[in-house]
Amino acid sequence: MIEKIFPNVDWEKMWEATLETLYMTGMSVIVTFVLGLALGILLFLTSKGNIWENKVAYSITNAVVNVFRSIPFIILIVLLIPFTKVLIGTIRGANAALPALIIGAAPFYARMVEIALREVNKGVIEAAKAMGAKTSTIIMKVLLPESMPALISGITVTAIALVGYTAMAGVIGAGGLGNLAFLDGFQRSRTDVTLAATILILVLVFIIQLVGDYFTNKIDKR
């Protein structure tokens, strides 16, 4: 039955492409979470009325986040080709897609982190400061625990966006389902290959959303 619906699909190649997409998404989500969290915390702490209030530091960080968040991903990949070649040694394959994926997603997540931290009750932060808590303690014991549901929800949205980014990266040779859908599907007029790759991408998105929603609801005590 499946062979009749998808006569041109090489399922071994499809499985390999799925693993490549999972690899690109997983690696970039991990690094994006760390970098985005650091940038978001820096944005929050250096903004007006907060612990490290510093107009210059906030303006610079804010500008960097806005610039990289605004560049369309397909253009960002092209702009980063020289950097990727120096860093990775090639512009093809799953590893070559990682710099663009991370640089494209980290500022996006950083803004979500900043928004999540702004939702934390100011009274809780002031109480911790009044008790003599260090900045590191306030971050680890107050800001992150209080904003964790929003942080997980944010990284879920970012992970879903990254799945889409990997598909775009595949068009220029990064591998994964996007690459397979374009080269084996679109360019060779094999609609079934494109459809199968699209279905698998949708399945990945649904799984990420379900996992993200599960952990968000489990942590959210409100």
Image (cartoon, rainbow, N blue to C red):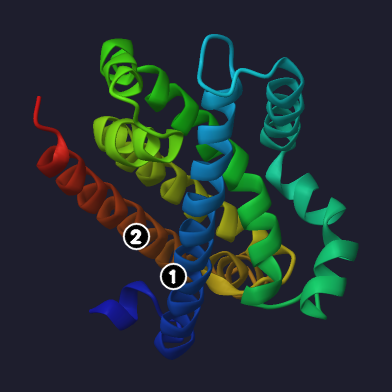
Q: Quadrant of the N terminus?
A: bottom left
Q: Nearer the viewer, residue 109 or 191?
A: 109
Q: How many neighbours does mark 1 have within 10 angstroms: few (below 14), some (14-19), or many (20 or more)?
A: some
Q: Nearer the viewer, residue 218 or 211?
A: 218
Q: How many neighbours does mark 2 have within 10 angstroms: few (below 14), some (14-19), or many (20 or more)?
A: some
Q: Earlier in the sequence, mark 2 or mark 1?
A: 1
- Which callout, 2 or 1, points to the residue nearer the camera? 1
Task: Tell me the element at label 1.
Answer: helix
In percent of width and height, residue 106 lies at 58, 45
Q: Nearer the viewer, residue 76 or 18?
A: 76
Total numbered labels placed on residues in the image? 2
The amino acid marked with disc number 1 is: Leu
Say whether marks 2 and 1 touch (CB < 8 Å).
Answer: yes
Image height of 62 relative to 34, above or below: above
The amino acid marked with disc number 2 is: Leu
Q: Residue at x 28, y 47 (%)?
A: 209
The residue that disc 1 covers is 22
Q: Residue at x 33, y 20 (%)?
A: 125
The outermost residue toward the right is 82
Residue 204 marker? 2
The answer for how far apart the CA atoms under marks 2 and 1 are is 8 Å
Image height of 16 relative to 180, above or below: below
Q: Residue at x 75, y 76 (%)?
A: 92
In percent of width and height, residue 48 lies at 58, 10
The outermost residue toward the bottom is 12
Q: Quadrant of the C terminus?
A: top left
Image height of 95 relative to 154, above or below: below
Q: Residue at x 42, y 48 (%)?
A: 160
